Image: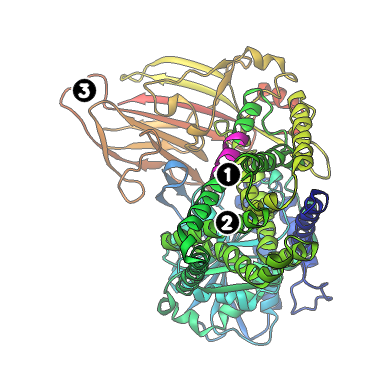
Amino acid sequence: LPEARGAPLVLLYLLGLRALAQVSHRQLLSRPPATAGPRDFSASRARGYLDNITAIGPRTVGSPENEVLAVNYLLEQIRGIERESTNAHKISIDVQRPTGSFSIDFLGGFTSYYANITNVVVKLEPRNGAEHAVLSNCHFDSVPNTPGASDDAVSCAVMLEILNTLSKSPESLQHAVIFLFNGAEENILQASHGFITQHEWAKSIRAFINLEAAGVGGKELVFQTGPENPWLVQAYVVAAKHPFASVVAQEIFQSGIIPADTDFRIYRDFGNVPGIDLAFIENGYIYHTEYDTSDRILTDSIQRAGDNILAVLKYLATSEKLAKSFEYRHGNVVFFDILGLFVLAYPARVGTIMNYITAAVAFFYLSKKVLQPKPRAVHNLKKLLTAFSLTLTSWLCTLVAVLMVAMFVSIIGRALSWYTHFYVSVSLYGTAAAAKLILVHMLAKKFFYKSVNEQYLGDVFFDASLMIWSIALAVMTHIGLCSAFICTLWVAFPLLTKLMIHKEFSQKGATIKFIVMYMLGMFVPYLYMLYLSWTVFEMFTPVMGRSGSEIPPDMVLAGFIVIFTMILSSYFINFIYLVKSTKTTLVTLTTVFVVTLILVCSGIFFPYSSDAANPKPKRVFLQHTSRRFHDLDGNVVKSDSGIWINGFDYNGISHITPHIPEINDTIRTPCEEQAPFCGLPWILPVHFMFRFRMSRAAGLHRRKPAAVAISHTSRTLRAKVHMSLYARPRAGSALSRWSLGDGVPVASLGGDYFVFYSRGLHAAPWHFWVELTAPEKHSDGIVSLAIAAHYFFGEDQKSPQLYALLERFPNWTFSSGWSCTYDLFVF
């Protein structure tokens, strides 16, 4: 087979499949939307709700915008819908303001306390009432300094329009639909906990749909279901008009690799209710930034979300299974969509049987190949195992080589060069991986298989790849991963292809006809893998810009690219042995790699972008902090003030210092060894993710600290809206019980204790107690207790110094700043 024919064919094949996958992902609606009537979901009406919610501005928990303006707007719209509803329905409205506490193992583990936060709850039910209900959940609060259009105002707009549509139907539903507009999700899932553990309607809920975002617009991905309850997936399969779902995304998310969580966890863990979790995943670069505006969300994106959620809610609200959902809680389900056209779903136990049968057939085929003819069985087995080992070795060498390149790029300060230009990552790490892979096999062919028939080598390396996938299939199935269905595709279709074209290959060798038939046979697994790879990279690439300064993003992305290169190469490795030479391909790949590496090292690819149409900003957080350290008698023994700067990615603030040279004069904030969390005012326990520094440039920043009233048995805090409480028992002491969560203290990573507090309007002082065991002699105290107050809104949010510094940040940054006070006490 001439290289001039083989290499272009493979390249065009992969590019063609990639283009097909890209078209599928960009196609938001399977058919153009018809003109919406009063009983149809209307994206234009939903957009009106969205624009009005985001026009309120940032909706931080505790702010008037969140607790008053947004709530009043929602109530006004809901009451208007109630007035225009048909007589078939009864609409009940409730504003809940719960207070509670819980512990969660997210971000290393911490405890959350909330007071008087806001939920707007609506129940749509038949006139004569309903015993059972399905819940639809969104949140209308946003992170500080952001409009929160995609996260999560658009979901609330969709829910308002769904409520409007259902209320105008002349036919009543069999079960109730509860719409929860929760007002404190960004404070780590507090409002959903308050609802599911305290609201009287929560007892009737048998299933839920949670609407979330990890990006801005695009398709909404079903990335969590259950637990168990396969009937919920079936409901989505049957009802959703524009499906987009993947059990692979579910297993990735639940592994904890992505630093995020949703209300799904609260309903599952504290309400014992099964559900479906959906999220917009496109353009995560501007998620939780000032660029998350309503104009960036396409109308078709709103329409598809509304069509899907309305259809699924109606299906559930008329399903007999909802009333007896506990009877259908049996096993997990394998589910995945095919190019957004439909969803394949089947019970995991059925998948297990299918997987083992597929693996068994493959092993039977390989055994027959080894035993033909029997006298050469040992020789054939040695050849197969040699090819198997060589393939794995080539993958390992490729992984090590590419990770070394990624490490070099990180060390010289060029990390994230691909952040704005994703093609750079493919040109750098993809070409390096392909070149290394080809080089290893080219050398093996030249020196190890010098006199072996090329046709035989092509055959044996195909079998080696089939053997690898068969083993992977058996292992993943044994572990219980639903994602093992991918291995089934990569065993079944190649095996069928081999059996169908074996005669052509054995008689005529690697002809063009053979290659075309071979590629057609591989169409399904290769197309699905490229389709899946788009989803994975769409989710993970933006995450690298907000994963902290300790994780080298180039190492992570390079690892992903190598893995996908291994997968895509697995059934083309045999082509290396079938072609006469691979020198031209190798030289071309190496040239592209070297040129890209030189350009990356030169700094020509700037990581961030302020492009108005497609911004990809760098995230920076600044806290103007005033700290006071008290001794056992309550005297202040040390105090300081400064602006604490954290870059949210691996580059830290290295790209910002040329624009603000004074930052070069700052000091790395020393860790206060005797204080919990190094004596720094973390809003969440993410200390393990960052290198941190404090600016000397800012003067003393005076804000009224959180007041602390001390008694022998308890502590009372005159609560600011957002506070962080940090505790560390001294040597020999232990925190045994407290009045928070379930009473059992939960330590964060490192052993300190973290409590996140937030409140709505007019909350009472925060009263709590802790119980410690301590040695008889403890003259230096038994516990260090610190409290930080965070000012996310209002006139106290930004000091003049902080304003001045924020104004100097370049336009390719999203710089979010606030003021805080920190006080450390010893008891």
Q: Does residue 541 sit above or below 471 in this rendering?
A: above
Q: Looking at the picture, how far across and down is residue 249, in whole percent?
A: 58, 57
* Residue annotated with mark 3: 778
Q: Bounds of the magenta span?
A: 393-402
The image quadrant of residue 544 is top right
Say which quadrant the C terminus sits in.
top left
Tell me which label, 3 or 1, sits earlier in the chain. Answer: 1
Q: CA distance from mark 1 to mark 2?
A: 12 Å
Callout 3: few (<14), some (14-19), or many (20+) C-alpha neighbours within 10 Å? some
Q: Which of label 3 and label 1 is nearer to you?
A: 1
Drawn side of residue 728 relative to residue 472, left or right? left
Tell me which label, 1 or 2, sits earlier in the chain. Answer: 1
Q: SS class of the residue under badge 2?
A: helix
> Is residue 301 magenta-colored?
no
Q: Looking at the picture, how far across and down is residue 593, in whole percent?
A: 74, 34
Residue shown at 71% from the left, 15% from the top: 661
> Is residue 400 magenta-colored?
yes
Drawn side of residue 384 relative to residue 169, left or right? left
Q: CA distance from mark 3 to mark 1?
A: 58 Å
Callout count:
3
* Residue annotated with mark 2: 465
